[in-house]
């Protein structure tokens, strides 16, 4: 039922891959390009053609786990399978992954393990589907095991490494019933405390027998009764009893090398920095932390842990920092949805990362956010309009640019600035006055055209002309006439000025869609104010939607880029630039920075990023 | 002279001098070592990561769009196992996706050479975007200032549809010639105080040719698939 499961590094190697059928195209490439690179990793699934894809990160090693399956299948176990795969892979290849160049190792041995894990999970879900219909929701909690699952490979238990590895191998490969072998499960339960609810939290106690049966083959899932037997929080005073329960586990776990549980996450003990005597003291402390107070780390131990710098970023550490980052971005006028998406994306790429000795979570978040912002703002298509015009010129047809936007953002003003720039580069420009609605719009353009003509030096080849047909006419028709006229008169560029319209005004949006559909301009440029906040997203989505819905074309057009106006008025609150690029995925061609014709600039990504992160 | 009378004075001085010398030497070596970095650049799907794995692990692994740089310090060896460079080189493979490639500028100051990988089979269609990237690399002030040599490795020559190297050179030169005109006419960047970040390539009034550049631009065909990377390894050997 699965089509593809693959494990890749962020660098682009496929470490392990299993194809179950022939794969059409490369859905994983599309996933990376459309979602992961665009900082949209906050979402949880992606559909490409007939495939649905789900993914999960192992940030510590920069690994990405991807599963692709047919879109129409309702596979409820994918999330759990991803997490299981991740854990299994991290455990099995612990040694290989610990090496600095783990890419060169051979991971083909993972094939049977994955198949087995998948089968077990599938059976389990097939059974559970009748019993517990709400199961799927529970599996979402597996998200939280991310950090827990990764504690394993970092364990530097040099002494017992072989033994543990052997045991894990045995567990993975041996599918014999595991009732009674509470030992390994105990370890696991401690390692990933939040993994347990997913297996069977809402199962009645009376169903214990059945759950026992179903979990016997799979080492990653823990049945309810096993969980209960491991939950010593209430019987803490009776340490004898807990000892007895843990007796089996002792063969697998070296108590003296156990880590601690902080905020519900098992943290692997640090590499042996302490003396032996000290270790004993921590041992006891350690155990008590393990069983009794999972919510807080003990003072001395935590302090030492901080010193040795093996802290792992988990939700609890990241949450306050990201919340702060989110407010900061909103303060910079970034739309609130978008700051939320970005923070989610940064979280997903940071969770589980190890923090250096002197590193703080906030610097790491800031660094990550900076890269993310740079990525979003960097154009993914060429912004070289002149080169485009050359190309159109070579085909001897005029290049047309349509300016769209809401009222009063500066469409006509920036159109004339662009016109001035084109004239400087010796192009022959025709301005089409397609704002037939607002009184004075044509006159405004006429003044601009006159000014621009006056600014032209006598020996320049550039030339500007206004194409007007008065008010009240159909804008699409005028634009069409203008382009035909430009073609016959050998103009290089046609700049089409449209009437400003609010994004909710359906009749006007329809007429805009018609203008675009009829004339098919080379570029549709959205002119937006840098002053807008949350509104930016709404405007862009609705304009895009209108172009799509009302066009009646097979391949509807969309906004190709933006001009951000009034940029000189906003100081460092440059959030609109981010909101707009994130919403459309299209570049900002220019920013308008003043009243004169020369106040048209290229957006400097580094400058915007700096302004956004500046306090 | 009282100081020199002390029997410990001379050894102490010698040790002091040696320590300083050692510090100085490590400093110099570090500087040199940092300039043994080679960047692998190029558009997506050209075969950068594959080339990187080939050089690093000498095997062909399936690859996918990179999201992060790959870095490695490696020693290139001949067929007979003798190293071809005096010391190990650092190889950095920078993702080719438009949104991620900006990272290469961070590495340019310590770069000894750039291996610009292009896909010989699709260059006919993607000449413009490829040339734009190459232009950005060439026009970067670090590239021109420190004369960073560039190898345009025309990958995938094993395929039937691959264009010959000479054809690729003509395509790229013609494209850069056009870009040169449009890029220099582009609107200036905001907040830039007049200084130009990029250099004008080649000679004004003449069509652009790679040989007009001060830094060496070499074109060579290679095939990662077949392990035919002689041109790359030889080029690196020549440089170091």
Image: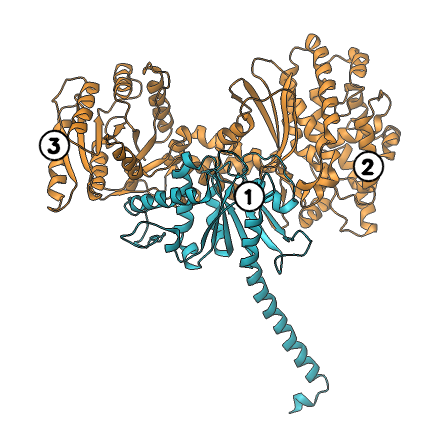
First-in-chain label (2 vs 3): 2
Give the answer, above or below, for where A326 lies relative to A477.
below
Chain label for disc 2: A
Q: Is residue A490 left or right of residue A120?
A: left
Colouring convention used in this rendered image of the protein: by chain
Q: Chain A in the picture: what colour?
A: orange
CA gap, disc 1 and disc 2: 33 Å
State the separation of the CA atoms marked 1 and 3.
52 Å
**Vertical relation: B198 (above or below) B157:** below
Please give the label number shown on residue A164: 2
The residue that label 1 is drawn on is B69
Q: Nearer the viewer, mark 1 or mark 2?
A: 1
The secondary structure type at the circle numbered 1 is loop
Q: For marks 1 and 3, give the one nearer the viewer.
A: 1
Query: Which chain is the one coloured cyan?
Result: B
Are dots 1 and 2 in contact, CB under 8 Å? no
Q: How many residues crowd mark 1 within 10 Å: few (<14), some (14–19), many (20+)?
A: some
**Residue with the mark numbered 3:** A446
Label 2: state its secondary structure.
helix
User: Hey, which quadrant is residue A530 in on the image?
Assistant: top left
Estimate the x, y position of residue B9 in percent, counting from the top left: 69, 84
């Amino acid at each position: 039922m699965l089509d593809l499961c693959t494990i890749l590094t962020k660098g682009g190697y496929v470490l392990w891959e299993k194809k179950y059928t022939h794969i059409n195209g490369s859905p994983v490439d599309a996933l990376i390009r459309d979602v992961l690179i665009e900082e949209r990793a906050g979402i949880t699934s992606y559909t490409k053609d007939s495939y649905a894809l789900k993914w999960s990160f192992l940030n510590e090693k920069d690994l990405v786990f991807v599963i692709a399956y047919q879109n129409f299948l309702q596979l409820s176990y994918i999330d759990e399978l991803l997490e299981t795969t991740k854990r299994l892979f991290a455990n099995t290849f612990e040694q290989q992954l610990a090496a600095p160049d783990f890419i060169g190792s051979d991971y083909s041995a993972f094939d049977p393990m994955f198949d087995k894990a998948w089968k077990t999970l599938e059976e389990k879900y097939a059974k559970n589907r009748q019993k517990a219909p709400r199961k799927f929701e529970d599996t979402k909690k597996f998200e939280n095991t991310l950090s827990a699952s990764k504690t394993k490979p970092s364990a530097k238990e040099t002494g017992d490494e072989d033994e543990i590895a052997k045991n894990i191998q045995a567990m993975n490969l041996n599918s014999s019933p595991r009732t009674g072998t509470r030992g390994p499960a105990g370890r696991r339960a401690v390692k990933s405390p939040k993994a347990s609810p997913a297996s069977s939290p809402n199962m009645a106690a009376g169903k214990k027998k059945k759950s026992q049966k179903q979990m016997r083959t799979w080492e990653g899932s823990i049945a309810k009764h096993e969980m209960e037997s491991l939950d010593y929080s209430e019987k803490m005073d009776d340490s004898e009893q807990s000892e007895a329960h843990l007796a089996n586990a002792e063969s697998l776990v070296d108590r003296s090398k156990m880590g601690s549980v902080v905020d519900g996450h098992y943290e692997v003990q640090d590499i042996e920095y302490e003396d032996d005597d000290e270790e004993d003291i921590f041992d006891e402390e350690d155990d008590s932390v393990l069983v009794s107070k999972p919510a807080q780390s003990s003072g001395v131990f935590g302090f030492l842990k901080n010193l040795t710098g093996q802290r792992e970023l988990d939700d609890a550490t990241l949450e306050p920092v990201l919340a702060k980052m989110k407010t900061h971005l909103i303060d910079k006028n970034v739309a609130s949805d978008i700051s939320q998406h970005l923070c989610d994306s940064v979280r997903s790429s940071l969770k589980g990362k190890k923090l250096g000795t002197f590193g703080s979570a906030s610097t790491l978040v800031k660094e990550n956010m900076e890269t993310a912002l740079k990525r979003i703002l960097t154009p993914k298509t060429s912004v070289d309009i002149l080169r485009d015009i050359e190309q159109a010129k070579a085909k001897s047809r005029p290049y047309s640019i349509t300016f769209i936007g809401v009222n009063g953002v500066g469409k006509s003003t920036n159109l004339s600035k662009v016109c001035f720039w084109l004239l400087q580069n010796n192009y022959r420009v025709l301005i089409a006055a397609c704002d037939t609605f607002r009184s004075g719009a044509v006159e405004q353009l006429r003044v601009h055209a006159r000014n621009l003509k006056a600014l032209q030096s006598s020996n320049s080849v550039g030339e500007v002309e206004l194409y007007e047909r008065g008010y009240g006419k159909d804008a699409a028709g005028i634009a069409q006439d203008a382009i035909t006229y430009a073609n016959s008169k050998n103009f290089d560029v046609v700049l089409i000025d449209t009437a400003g319209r609010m994004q909710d005004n359906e009749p006007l949006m329809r007429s805009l869609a018609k203008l675009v559909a009829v004339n098919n301009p080379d570029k549709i440029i959205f002119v937006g104010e840098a002053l807008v906040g949350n509104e930016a997203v709404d405007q862009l989505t609705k304009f895009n939607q209108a172009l799509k819905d009302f066009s009646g074309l097979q391949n509807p057009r969309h906004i190709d880029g933006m001009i951000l106006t009034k940029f000189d008025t906003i100081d460092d609150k440059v959030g609109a630039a981010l909101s707009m690029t994130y919403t459309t995925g299209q570049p900002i061609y220019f920013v308008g920075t003043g009243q004169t014709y020369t106040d048209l600039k290229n957006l400097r990504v580094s400058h915007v990023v700096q302004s956004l992160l500046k306090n | 002279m009282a100081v020199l009378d002390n029997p410990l004075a001379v050894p102490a001085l010698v040790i002091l001098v040696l320590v300083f010398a050692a510090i100085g030497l490590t400093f110099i070596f570090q500087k040199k070592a940092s300039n043994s970095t080679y960047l692998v650049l190029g558009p997506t799907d050209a075969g950068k990561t594959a080339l990187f794995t080939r050089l690093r692990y000498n095997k062909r692994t399936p690859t996918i769009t990179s999201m992060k740089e790959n870095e490695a310090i490696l020693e290139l060896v001949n067929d007979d196992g003798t190293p071809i460079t005096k010391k190990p080189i650092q190889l950095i493979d920078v993702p080719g996706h438009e949104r991620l490639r900006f990272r290469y500028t961070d590495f340019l100051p310590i770069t000894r050479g750039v291996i610009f990988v292009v896909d010989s089979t699709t260059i006919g269609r993607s000449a413009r975007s490829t040339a734009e990237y190459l232009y950005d690399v060439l026009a970067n002030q670090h590239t021109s200032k420190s004369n960073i040599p560039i190898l345009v490795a025309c990958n995938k020559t094993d395929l039937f549809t691959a264009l010959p190297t000479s054809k690729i050179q003509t395509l790229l030169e013609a494209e850069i010639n056009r870009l040169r005109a449009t890029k220099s006419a582009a609107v200036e960047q905001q907040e830039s105080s007049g200084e130009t970040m990029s250099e004008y390539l080649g000679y004004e009034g003449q069509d652009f040719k790679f040989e007009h550049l001060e830094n060496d631009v070499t074109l060579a065909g290679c095939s990662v698939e077949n392990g035919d990377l002689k041109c790359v390894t030889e080029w690196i050997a020549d440089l170091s």
